[in-house]
Image: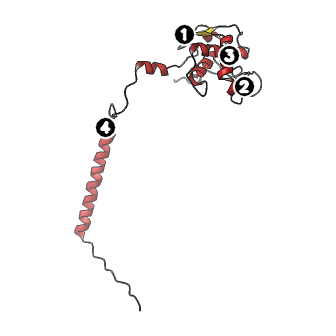
């Protein structure tokens, strides 16, 4: 037995149907443009219904940047004798017993291609800032100001930049001259708008 394909006829589309479809399309496009344009000019809300404003204490605890001239350094002090035991306890596992071994970034040394505090860092205040902000790796921001001053003194002493007996604080740290300082160009001297 043979099956015949059913013949389907298309109903003719009337001009009225086309006119209505076109008008509906125009109305939709116009409404879309009006809504889209209105959304672009709306201001975002002041609040989104979650969270709370930060307290001044929270803002101050995060605003801890230290400038090369020492602006922002906290009270406290430390020397190599304070920093050595802190280094052994909290830093040696990543940077080696003397700072030369690794497995992570080597911190001590002045020759070779490895960038260390002794041959690459331009400001002593940057050493303090980085330690306070990011170290130790497993608990960043947990060191006291005295511990960070001590670690900075220990590392600068290990790199033969300061004497092991030098006491660092907010006054003495910015005055430490780093060997690599002259290799860096101040940002303002690179670009000066005319």
| Label 1 vs 3, first from the N-terminus | 1
Asked if labels 3 and 4 touch by Cβ distance under 8 angstroms, the answer is no
Q: Is residue 68 shown above or below 93? A: above
Residue 183, can we see it? no
**Residue at the disc numbered 2:** 96
Rounded to the nearest angstrom, the CA distance separating label 3 from label 2 is 13 Å
Badge 1 or badge 2: first in the primary sequence:
1
| Residue ID at (48%, 20%) | 61
Percent from the top left, x then y, of residue 23?
25, 59
Q: Which mark is residue 63?
A: none
The residue tagged 4 is 42
Q: Secondary structure at mark 3?
A: helix
- The numbered mark, 4 or 3, whose residue comes first in the sequence reads 4
Q: Is residue 35 visible?
A: yes
* Quadrant placement of the N terminus: bottom left
Residue that carries the numbered disc 1 in the rendered image: 75
Q: Residue 85: give its label.
A: 3
Q: Position of residue 87 (x, y in %)?
A: 67, 19
Q: Residue at x 77, y 26 (%)?
A: 112
- Quadrant hosting residue 151: top right
As drawn, is 167 to the left or to the right of 37? right
Q: In the image, is 169 to the left or to the right of 50?
A: right
Q: Nearer the viewer, mark 4 or mark 1?
A: 1
Bin the neighbour count of mark 1 within 10 Å (Cα to Cα): few under 14, some 14-19, many 20 and up: few
The first of marks 2 and 4 along the sequence is 4
What is the distance, in whole Å, between disc 2 and disc 4 at their CAs?
A: 57 Å
- Front position among marks 3 and 2: 3
Distance from disc 4 to disc 3, alpha carbons, whole Å, reads 58 Å
In the displayed image of the protein, which residue is found farthest to the right?
112
């Amino acid at each position: 037995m043979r099956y015949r394909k059913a013949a389907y006829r298309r109903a003719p589309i009337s001009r009225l149907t086309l006119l209505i479809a076109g008008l509906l399309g125009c109305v939709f496009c116009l409404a879309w443009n009006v809504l889209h344009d209105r959304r672009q000019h709306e201001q975002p809300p002041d609040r989104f219904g979650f969270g709370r404003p930060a307290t001044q204490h929270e803002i101050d605890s995060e605003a801890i940047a230290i400038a090369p001239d020492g602006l922002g350094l906290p009270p406290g002090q430390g020397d190599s004798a304070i920093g050595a035991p802190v280094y052994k306890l909290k830093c040696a596992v990543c940077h080696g017993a003397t700072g030369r071994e690794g497995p992570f970034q080597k911190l001590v040394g002045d020759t070779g291609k490895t960038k260390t505090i002794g041959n690459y860092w331009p400001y002593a205040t940057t050493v303090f800032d980085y330690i306070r902000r990011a170290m130790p790796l497993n608990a960043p921001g947990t060191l006291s100001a005295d511990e960070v001053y001590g670690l900075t003194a220990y590392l600068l002493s290990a790199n033969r930049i300061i004497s092991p007996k030098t006491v660092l604080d907010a006054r003495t740290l910015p005055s430490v001259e780093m060997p690599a300082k002259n290799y860096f160009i101040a940002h303002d001297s690179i670009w000066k708008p005319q």
